[in-house]
Image (spheres, rainbow, N blue to C red):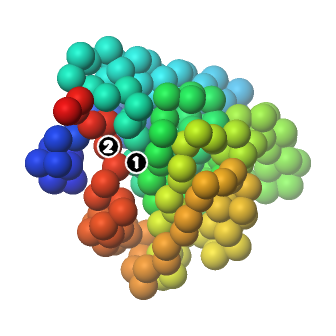
């Protein structure tokens, strides 16, 4: 919210999206152990993000040639998908994100291993953002990563960045996963993104 207010002072229109886990009990039902259910749910989320772009594009005050997406962590993973399938996104700021849903699942479900892990990856891989982010043009992508991020190794961040299409840029900070959003928001180039009001 604070970032949206700051951007609004620069004539940006911001649409804030709840994280999937914001719904509490419903999140618990959807985040099942069945990868097929999770895959279908994540596809719904990607479609919902496109409907959000529909909404913001429909506002008469919005300049549809200056629509951007900003996402942190899981939001950065979905941002790679969105940039790869929706040409209306002209810029993306992706913070602390990686390209694989299976890697995120392993972080949150340490028992996921062996054949179960292979099956999970087989089901989720077709929707992994690393397969979509290569199709991001005309979207310009700006990646932010923390050197002290304890969730994923640096190589995972570099793989996500490496898979992305040009134009792209990268910035590293001496912060952890959770501090990155606030730190990166202060970067002058990050502060220039948003869906802007027509002048």
15, 107: nearer the viewer:
15
Left/right of residue 126 with respect to residue 44 in the rendered view: right
Q: x%, y% of residue 183?
A: 31, 72
Image marks 2 and 1: residues in contact by CB distance under 8 Å: yes
Q: x%, y% of residue 126?
A: 78, 35
Q: Residues within 10 Å of mark 2 (few under 14, many from 20)?
A: many
Left/right of residue 151 with respect to residue 157 in the rendered view: left
Q: Quarter of the image containing the C terminus?
A: top left
The image shows residue 166, relative to residue 138, as above or below, that is below
Q: Nearer the viewer, mark 2 or mark 1?
A: 2
Q: x%, y% of residue 146?
A: 47, 75
Tell me the distance, in whole angstroms, between the alpha carbons under discs 2 and 1: 8 Å
Which residue occupies 39% across, 35% down? 67
Which residue occupies 50% across, 59% down? 142
176, 161: nearer the viewer:
161
Which residue occupies 54% across, 50% down? 140
Q: In which quarter of the image is residue 167?
A: bottom right
36, 156: nearer the viewer:
156
Q: x%, y% of residue 174?
A: 42, 84
Q: Residues within 10 Å of mark 1 (few under 14, many from 20)?
A: many
**Nearer-N-terminus badge (2/1):** 1
Q: Can residue 28 be seen in this view?
A: no
Q: In which quarter of the image is residue 23?
A: top left
Q: What element carries label 2?
A: loop
Question: Which residue bears the numbered disc 1?
Answer: 70
Which residue occupies 64% across, 74% down? 153
Question: Which residue bears the numbered disc 2?
Answer: 194
Q: Is residue 93 visible?
A: yes
């Amino acid at each position: 919210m604070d970032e949206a207010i700051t951007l609004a002072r620069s004539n940006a229109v911001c649409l804030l999206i709840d994280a999937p886990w914001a719904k509490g009990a419903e999140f618990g039902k959807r985040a099942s152990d069945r990868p097929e259910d999770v895959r279908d749910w994540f596809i719904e989320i990607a479609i919902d993000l496109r409907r959000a772009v529909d909404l913001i594009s429909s506002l008469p005050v919005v300049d549809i040639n200056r629509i951007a997406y900003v996402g942190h962590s899981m939001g950065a993973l979905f941002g790679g998908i969105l940039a790869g399938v929706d040409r209306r996104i002209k810029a993306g700021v992706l913070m602390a994100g990686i390209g694989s849903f299976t890697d995120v699942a392993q972080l949150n479900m340490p028992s996921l291993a062996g054949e179960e892990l292979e099956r999970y990856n087989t089901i989720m891989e077709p929707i992994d953002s690393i397969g979509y982010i290569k199709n991001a043009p005309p979207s310009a992508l700006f990646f932010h990563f923390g050197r002290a991020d304890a969730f994923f190794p640096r190589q995972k961040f570099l793989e996500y960045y490496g898979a992305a299409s040009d134009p792209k840029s990268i910035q590293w900070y001496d912060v952890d996963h959770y501090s990155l959003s606030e730190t990166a928001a202060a970067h002058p180039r990050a502060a220039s993104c948003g869906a802007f009001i027509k002048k």
